[in-house]
Image (cartoon, helix red, strand yellow):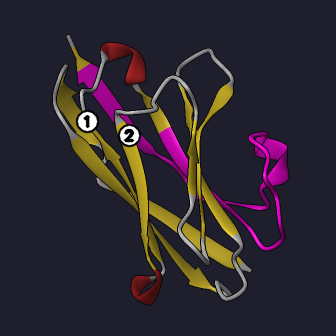
Amino acid sequence: QVQLVESGGGLVQAGGSLRISCAASGRSLGIYTMAWFRQAPGKERDFVGRISWSDGSTYYADSVKGRFTISRDNAKSTVYLQMNSLKPEDTAVYFCAAVKRFYGGSASSGYDYWGQGTQVTVSS
């Protein structure tokens, strides 16, 4: 079993930056891909981006491309989401997710392990 714990959420003004983290523990060996999703009140959980655990390659949703960056620290089993030029519409609960097999898609159903989420609020 893999445990994922997000941290670093908070309140930030529009145009500001925030970095959130996701630490993996438990049987984290063998993780193939980690991803970030977000869910605003009353909306579906949306894909934000993903990173390959082995080579660090990344892929982003169009809505965040150029503003958000995903990185990883393998030694710490931690993935980061650096969010710049934040907008009020980025307000959501942000979740990290992991999968131990190849999965190159953006559907939440493709990920087997989930964190509890961290709230990010962007004020206008």
Question: Most extreme residue toward the top, as rendered?
Answer: 124
Read off the magenta span: 94-122
Residue 34 is drawn in which quadrant?
bottom right
Mark 1: secondary structure: loop
Q: In the image, residue 120 lies at what x, y percent?
A: 35, 35
For label 2, count other residues whose C-alpha is less than 10 Å away and answer few (under 14), some (14-19) or many (20+): many
Q: Closest to the observer: 52 or 114? A: 52
Q: Which residue is at a point 29% across and 53% down the rendered structure image? A: 8
Residue under label 2, please give it. 68
Q: Amino acid at mark 2?
A: Phe
Q: In the image, residue 82 lies at what x, y percent?
A: 32, 48
Mark 2: secondary structure: strand
In this picture, residue 29 sits left or right of residue 16: right
Does the segment drawn in magenta span residue 9?
Answer: no
Q: Amino acid at mark 1?
A: Asn
Asked if disc 1 and disc 2 are in contact, CB closer than 8 Å, the reply is yes
Residue 84 is drawn in which quadrant?
top left
- In this view, 6 is above or below 94: below
Question: Quarter holding the C terminus?
Answer: top left
Residue under label 1, please give it. 84
